[in-house]
Amino acid sequence: MSTTPQPTISTLNIATRQSPLALWQAEHIRDRLLALYPNLTINLLKIVTKGDKILDTPLAKIGGKGLFVKELEQAMYDKEADIAVHSLKDVPMQLPEGLMLGAYCKRAAPTDAFVSNTYNSIDELPQGAIVGTSSLRRQCQIKTYRPDLQIKTLRGNVGTRLGKLDAGEYDAIILATSGLQRIELDARIRGELDIDMCLPAVGQGALAIECREGDTEILALLAPLNDEQARIRLIAERALNRHLDGGCQVPIAAYAVLHADNASDYTNDDNGNTLWLRGRVGQADGSALLKAEKRVMLSGTQAEQEAQANQLGIEVATMLLADGAGAILAAIYHPEE
């Protein structure tokens, strides 16, 4: 018998996009909640967002990935939905008034996947090969590593993107490893980009659950899904992005791990008490790639550690700004000036 306190509410409505990956995410959270609360009735409210409708324009030109969450948030304002499940990398750094992230779930693979029908790695691509991605973050790092490659915009859900690759429009495409794994398309992954070569997006691989502020019943319901180690890491990454005034579709990368002070391999998360944050900002054409990193030993209560993680994000962002990140980002935010 479950020892988890059972909720007083009888029905929970989850807002979700209709893409296969978004539905998998919502169904995954539904199933986890039902395992905890078997008497709860959970409905999925399936919504088509503006970001799903506009597929012929780069996200950076039409408002960024926030376009994928606005309609879901409106459903919560209208009390049609109680929560929304998001890929955290799609969630804007500033949430609308009255909404909050009620849970950070355990993080899956944060890496970028190399997908090709012909080549096994980015190093095998011939000079001038065409690589598809919708991400300026991926573009700037790949162009820094391989200036000869042609980067072409790739939009649509995972199936649409794979279809364009299969049709011969690209020699390779780059997708989130976790997304392919979640919808059982692991076989399409030829390899994962080395994190040192292509630092992940803020929050990549993590699911977050958004809800209304002050909704104590819902927050209590979600509490068992919260992963404290992931939460600390993701707070640091999002603080960096927020301090850079970064949206979701800008050439900003950030990745945090927790490691023991005596660790010999700092690249893997081992749930130690030293938080290591790396951040990058780059020119989309790969002509400049700024890097900064810092470690902090966490101490105190959970709230104090979260404050320390937030401060670490601000400090690494400040280092990037001191190196010239502001000018790079301003040129993207205000290209006409």
Image: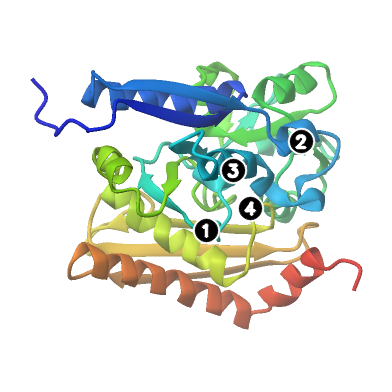
Cβ atoms at labels 2 and 1 below 8 Å apart? no
| Residue 307 vs residue 161, the one in the foreground | 307
Q: Is residue 176 above or below residue 98?
A: above
The residue lying at 14 percent from left, 34 percent from top is 5
**Crowding at label 4, few (<14), some or many (≥20) Cα neighbours within 10 Å?**
many
Image quarter of residue 309: bottom left
Residue indicated by mark 2: 132
Give the color scheme: rainbow, by chain, secondary structure or one colour: rainbow
User: Which mark is on residue 74?
Assistant: 3
The amino acid pointed to by label 1 is Ala
User: Which mark is on residue 266?
Assistant: none
Could you say where residue 289 lies in the image, as x and y percent from the top left? Answer: 67, 65
Gap in Å between the C-alphas at discs 4 and 1? 12 Å
Residue indicated by mark 4: 248
- Frontmost of labels 4 and 1 is 4
**Crowding at label 2, few (<14), some or many (≥20) Cα neighbours within 10 Å?**
many
